[in-house]
Image (spheres, rainbow, N blue to C red):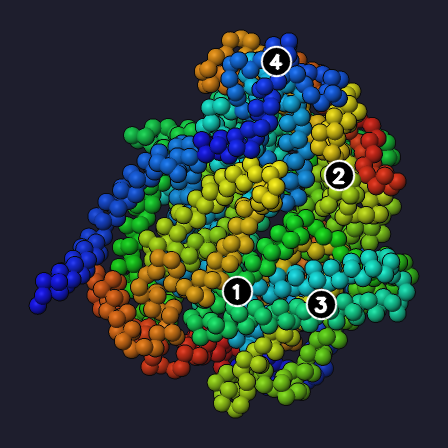
């Protein structure tokens, strides 16, 4: 790892030095829950760094279409660290390039690579927490490792319920009593039903044709949607699994059109066919009914390359998407402004959840640091884990007040609904549904 | 005779004798060799530049993961390298091994069978499926076999994916129990050393078995079939049974790899067994040198390490150039994204310029270069070399590719091309 | 063996000329009736699905022709052919985007002459380019290995396939690229009562048939075509009779590539997206088509393409899309095991 450190130093050096030489501000243990209100300034005061330097690792797929979702997360994390003054609990905190790990192989996330990365991450004593991954399947390969190592892991995007709930979650953890995994987004068993509720209550449609991409996320959210839709008295006229290798979508939608659904629900992401299916639906004469999908299709405006709206063009006129997360969080405007000032582009997708994860990690580090914390990195790591997963603590994050359940799920079970805005050629926030604390 | 001449001859003698000893005592030499390799690998990460790249534990983890590919490549080498059959769906047998372990030892199934028993069972199940696939298809000629196996490799993950009730579908079976072995004790997620030891052990056993097979009657039958199936059949070799055996042995090894990988990753899901795996392993076998067990093992190991560790580190290294003029472009290159492009280029270049692989087996080398070696002197030398390296333990070989090539029909019509495709049932 | 069988060749001599069209038509009718009455699919849907199957099948057939001709002449499964088709789809996409961008036209184009002109131009650009790409692949990667053991060119072909696919991945990224759907698929529909079928399906089918008839005529009736057939039958004898082997083989790759290019154009019109792994997925099905019809047999490849198209649409119509790939491969396995020479291929012993 020295090699990496060298590389990081060579370049990141200027930045680190810059941060260190700033006059320490008068706020020792600079609060990680630095409210977003103060964030617009963009330059948090440098905190107390007397106890040394620690790192937060990031583990995300950084290739292909998934990079579009991952980059805002990294940006969000770095923004949070910067605004906290690059310090917490008496430690200088860094997110160097060398601690950003890529789990994509051949253009898509890969659980095996994710596990290999996690094996490396847990070996680095200067890493106190890891933020990631993007995909639930990668998380299921990583949690056994990070849990055994007692390393705090916060995912800004995992939505599969099996990661935290029930027997499957217990089976993943060698030490179920010492949870290390938390997430700031709510689960598919909330996101799917939210869409069902919206279609029936707000759009007034009583029947649906469901298509999923047969992958972990897509099928999971579609199954949860189906259960809720039926529960609410709706009719599911068909549920088709359409793998991303499919070539002919036209016949699928022809078959769907014959069933005369009042709406279509797509469980999946853009890369697995979100826009292709929409186009085929419009061609099959289903262009006038709502086309609803999860956050997998809420991946940027029509100007973002390879995004759903970019590929769908005008066919997206009746499209809706849900986002597992709060859409109009209180400090949204400040956050967007700070983000844009820092990166010169709009905050999209999971930028805010990445920011929130970093806030949680920094706050855990602050509390761990306050309770002592010296140069014993193993003890610090354990203290951060214990602090981060403490279900009695309430975090003041950019997403609002949140607590975590003992399993690691966020108390904030809010789903935001977006609709396509043909004027802006972008998703427009419609409303959010609060499912309340569990 | 001058002293220099004596010296030269003595040296040559020594080398040949050494090789002779290695071949005669193959089992012992593999045991010694693998212990040495394991020992060296354990200490290698302490030495620069390896120590700079990654942590010792992370290296051991990478070694153990690379071992999975070594096993896969060893198995595929039996099918492609020794018997000359192109199997493009090899990942399917890997999947059978992995799912067998998942059923044998996971909370999902409620069973908790010992690791060693499951290692054996996983191999048996994979071998059975090898026979099941092979029995109807091995009668077909080579390229149909390639397509059938490709189809099989596509189908198997689809079936695991779509039968959710029994396989948990796309979520995969998680929480698989880790091994608990005598001496080593129970394994944990971070016990990379234990996995490393087990992997070295499995590879050693596999290598001993494979070398024994290669040197046996069956091994010679495989090579005879590879070189000239008609001639092999005419010499009384039951070609279907022999090919079937190659298939089953290859599948067995993949079964080992599957069980080990499932026990290490603790989750199996259909997307771990796609065509990309089959292709990667094929590239490893071709690069290592089809037919040469050690060569293939080394090739697979190096490629797997490059893939899992080196490319990642390279990416992180160049990413630190971000923002620096000129070098910034380099920082945006994602080397992992290029890996399949590199494999493709490597395959093509190898086939065009060095078909025998980086670490060739002498016999295979001659065979693949048959059209080029027209110089009789070179032929004689190559023959001599081959006789020394390959046939010491096995005794005389009935067929010789160079002779076939030189005396038979012109190269343009080697046995396969000359045969009409209707022959596949004969 | 007559690797490239044509109406004039001995393979189909025993069947009268009307045999295949009539049987095919009967098959389509039976398919329709099966959907309609056995599985209770609505009249309109069943007819639309037949149209979908025809256009899907036409694309598979066009790609399958390249596999089958190459196999017929040098007995090589050209694994890279599916990716050659993918490159064709990208070339067509790029051309159309450029034209639309520079002329201010917007898709879809409702002016028929302009539309036909544009499609014609796309074909004229894509077909020769992709044909030449295919010739280049043969020249540089397969020709040096023509006398090598069989495994060598086969592995090379897989390598070339991955090279093409990953170059496309690096250039275009792993996401979809939108291809301009210049043919008005939504508005131009054939109405029979309440049933509407996009004219595009019929256009694609007709275009594919025209290309195939042209190919048949070329192979069956011209001097070069005769050279191809004789080379396929016996390479040495053909060479002795004065056939230029290299030229003939290059011609075969040119024709196969050009058809794959045409398939690429048609693909963009029909589905409106291109992706780097398209060649692998569609190519596999096209190859299955070629084997199904009897590899080396031109008519067989076309027939196989349509059968695979119909099988796929069948699985989809019954709401079993996730099993459609499975079904296609099971069909392939059954054919290979029970009739390895394919539907129209000759069985052992037919060859004198």
Q: Nearer the viewer, residue A300 or B197?
A: A300
Q: Determine the secondary structure under disc 3.
A: helix
Tell me if mark 4 has few (under 14), some (14-19) or many (20+) residues whose alpha carbon lies within 10 angstroms of its own.
some
Which residue sits at x=54%, y=54%? B341
Residue A109 quadrant:
top right
Q: Residue A394: x and y, percent? A: 66, 13
Residues at marks 2 and 1, CA–CA distance in whole angstroms = 39 Å
| Image-quadrant location for residue B10 | bottom left
Q: Identify the residue at image location x=46%, y=50%.
A: B93
Q: Which mark is residue C157?
A: 1
| Mark nearer the viewer, 3 or 1 | 3
Q: CA distance from mark 3 to mark 1?
A: 22 Å
Q: Residue at the spot x=71%, y=23% of the render?
A: A42
Residue B223 rendering spot, x and y as whole percentages = 33, 65
B279, C17: nearer the viewer: B279
Within-10-Å neighbours for mark 2: few <14, some 14–19, many 20+: many
Look at discs 2 and 4 and give the one toward the viewer. Answer: 4
Query: Is there a contact, CB below 8 Å, between mark 3 and mark 4?
Result: no
Labelled disc at residue A24 = 4
């Amino acid at each position: 790892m020295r090699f990496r450190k060298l590389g990081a130093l060579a370049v990141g050096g200027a930045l680190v030095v810059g941060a260190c030489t700033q006059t320490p501000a008068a706020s020792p243990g600079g609060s990680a829950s630095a409210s977003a209100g103060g964030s617009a300034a963009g330059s948090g005061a440098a905190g107390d760094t007397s106890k040394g330097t620690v790192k937060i690792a990031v583990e995300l797929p950084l290739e292909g279409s998934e990079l579009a979702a991952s980059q805002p997360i990294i940006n969000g994390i770095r923004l949070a660290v910067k605004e906290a003054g690059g310090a917490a609990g008496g430690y200088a905190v860094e997110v160097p390039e060398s601690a950003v790990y890529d789990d994509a192989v051949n253009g898509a996330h890969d659980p095996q690579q994710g596990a290999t990365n996690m094996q490396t991450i847990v070996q680095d004593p200067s890493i106190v927490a890891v933020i990631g991954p993007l995909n639930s399947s990668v998380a299921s390969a990583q949690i056994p490792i990070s849990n055994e190592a007692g390393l705090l892991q916060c995912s800004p995007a995992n939505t599969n319920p099996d990661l935290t709930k029930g027997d499957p979650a217990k089976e993943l953890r060698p030490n179920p009593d010492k949870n290390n995994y938390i997430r700031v987004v709510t689960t598919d068993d909330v996101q799917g039903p939210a869409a069902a509720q919206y279609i029936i209550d707000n759009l007034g449609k009583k029947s649906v044709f469901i298509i999923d991409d047969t992958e972990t996320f897509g099928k999971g959210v579609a199954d949860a949607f189906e259960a809720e839709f039926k529960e609410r008295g709706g009719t599911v006229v068909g549920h088709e699994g359409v793998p991303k290798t499919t070539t002919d979508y036209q016949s699928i939608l022809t078959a769907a059109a014959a069933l005369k659904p009042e709406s279509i629900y797509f469980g999946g992401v853009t890369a697995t066919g979100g826009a292709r299916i929409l186009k085929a639906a419009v061609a099959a004469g289903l262009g006038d009914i709502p086309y609803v999908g999860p956050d997998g299709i809420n991946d940027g405006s029509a100007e973002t390359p390879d995004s759903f709206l970019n590929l769908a063009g005008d066919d997206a006129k009746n499209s809706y998407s849900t986002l597992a997360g709060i859409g109009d969080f209180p400090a949204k405007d400040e956050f967007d402004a700070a983000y844009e000032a820092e990166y010169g582009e709009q905050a999209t997708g999971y930028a805010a959840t990445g920011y929130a994860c970093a806030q949680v990690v920094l706050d855990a580090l602050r509390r761990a640091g306050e309770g002592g914390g010296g140069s014993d990195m193993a003890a610090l790591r354990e203290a951060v884990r214990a602090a981060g997963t403490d279900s009695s603590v309430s975090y003041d994050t950019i997403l609002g007040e949140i607590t975590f359940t003992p399993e690691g799920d966020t108390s904030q079970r809010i789903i935001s609904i977006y609709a396509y805005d043909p004027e802006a050629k972008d998703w427009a926030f419609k409303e959010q549904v609060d499912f309340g604390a569990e | 005779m001058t002293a220099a001449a004596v010296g030269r001859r003595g040296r040559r003698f020594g080398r040949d004798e050494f090789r002779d000893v290695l071949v005669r005592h193959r089992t012992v030499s593999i045991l010694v060799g693998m212990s040495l390799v394991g020992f060296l690998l354990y200490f290698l990460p302490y030495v620069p530049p390896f120590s700079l790249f990654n942590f010792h534990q992370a290296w051991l983890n990478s070694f153990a993961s690379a071992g999975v590919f070594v096993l896969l490549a060893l198995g595929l080498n039996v099918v492609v390298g020794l018997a000359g059959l192109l199997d493009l769906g090899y990942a399917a047998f890997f999947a059978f091994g992995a799912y067998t372990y998942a059923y044998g030892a996971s909370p999902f199934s409620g069973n908790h069978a010992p690791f060693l028993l499951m290692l054996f069972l996983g191999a048996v199940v994979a071998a059975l499926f090898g026979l099941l696939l092979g029995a109807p298809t091995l009668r077909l000629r080579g390229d149909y076999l390639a397509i059938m196996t490709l189809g099989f490799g596509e189908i198997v993950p689809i079936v695991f994916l779509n039968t959710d009730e029994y396989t948990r579908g796309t979520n995969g079976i998680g929480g698989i129990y880790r091994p608990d072995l005598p001496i080593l004790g129970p394994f944990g997620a971070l016990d990379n050393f234990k996995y490393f030891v087990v992997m070295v052990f499995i590879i050693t056993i596999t290598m001993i078995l494979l070398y024994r097979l290669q040197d046996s009657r069956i091994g010679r039958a495989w090579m005879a079939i590879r070189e000239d199936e008609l001639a092999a059949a005419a010499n009384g070799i039951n070609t279907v049974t022999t090919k079937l055996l190659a298939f089953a042995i290859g599948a067995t090894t993949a079964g080992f790899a599957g069980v080990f990988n499932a026990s290490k990753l603790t989750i199996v899901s259909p997307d771990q067994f796609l065509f990309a795996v089959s292709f990667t392993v094929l590239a490893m076998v071709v690069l290592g040198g089809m037919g040469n067990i050690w060569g293939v093992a080394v090739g697979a190991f190096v490629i797997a390490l490059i893939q899992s560790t080196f490319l990642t580190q390279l990416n992180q290294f160049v990413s630190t150039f971000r923002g620096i003029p000129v070098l910034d472009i380099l920082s945006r290159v994602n080397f992992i994204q290029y890996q399949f492009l590199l494999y493709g280029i490597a395959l093509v270049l190898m086939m065009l310029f060095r078909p025998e692989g980086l670490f060739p087996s002498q016999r295979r080398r001659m065979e693949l270069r048959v059209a080029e070696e027209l110089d009789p002197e070179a032929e004689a030398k190559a023959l001599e070399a081959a006789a020394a390296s390959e046939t010491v333990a096995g005794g005389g070989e009935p067929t010789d590719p160079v002779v076939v090539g030189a005396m038979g029909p012109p190269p343009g019509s080697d046995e396969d091309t000359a045969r009409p495709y209707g022959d596949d049932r004969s | 063996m007559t690797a490239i069988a044509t109406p004039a060749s001995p393979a189909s001599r025993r069947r009268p000329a009307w045999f295949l069209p009539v049987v095919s038509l009967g098959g389509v009718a039976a398919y329709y009736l099966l959907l309609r009455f056995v599985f209770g699919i609505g009249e309109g849907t069943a007819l639309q699905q037949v149209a979908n199957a025809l256009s899907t099948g036409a694309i598979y057939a066009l790609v399958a022709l390249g596999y089958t001709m190459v196999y017929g002449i040098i007995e090589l499964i050209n694994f890279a052919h599916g990716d050659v088709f993918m490159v064709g789809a990208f070339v067509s996409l790029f051309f159309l985007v450029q034209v639309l961008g520079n002329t201010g036209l917007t898709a879809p184009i409702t002016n028929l002459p302009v539309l036909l002109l544009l499609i014609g131009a796309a074909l004229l650009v894509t077909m020769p380019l992709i044909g030449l790409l295919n010739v280049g692949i043969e020249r540089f990667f397969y020709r040096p290995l023509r006398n090598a053991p069989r495994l060598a060119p086969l592995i090379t072909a897989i390598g070339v396939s991955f090279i093409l696919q990953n170059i496309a991945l690096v250039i275009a990224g792993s996401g979809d690229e939108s291809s301009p759907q210049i043919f008005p698929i939504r508005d131009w529909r054939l109405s029979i009562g309440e049933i509407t079928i996009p004219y595009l399906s019929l256009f694609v089918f007709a275009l594919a048939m025209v290309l195939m008839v042209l190919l048949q005529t070329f192979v069956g009736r011209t001097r070069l075509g005769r050279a191809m057939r004789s080379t396929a039958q016996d390479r040495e004898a053909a060479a002795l009779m004065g056939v230029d082997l290299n030229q003939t083989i290059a011609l075969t790759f040119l024709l196969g590539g050009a058809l794959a290019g045409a398939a690429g154009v048609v693909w963009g019109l029909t589905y409106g997206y291109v992706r780097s792994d398209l060649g692998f997925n569609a190519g596999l099905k096209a190859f299955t088509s070629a084997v199904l019809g009897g590899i080396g047999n031109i008519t067989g490849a076309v027939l196989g393409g349509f059968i695979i198209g119909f099988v796929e649409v069948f699985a989809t119509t019954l709401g079993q899309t996730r099993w459609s790939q499975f079904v296609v491969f099971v069909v392939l396995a059954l054919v290979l095991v029970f009739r390895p020479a394919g539907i129209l291929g000759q069985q052992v012993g037919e060859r004198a």
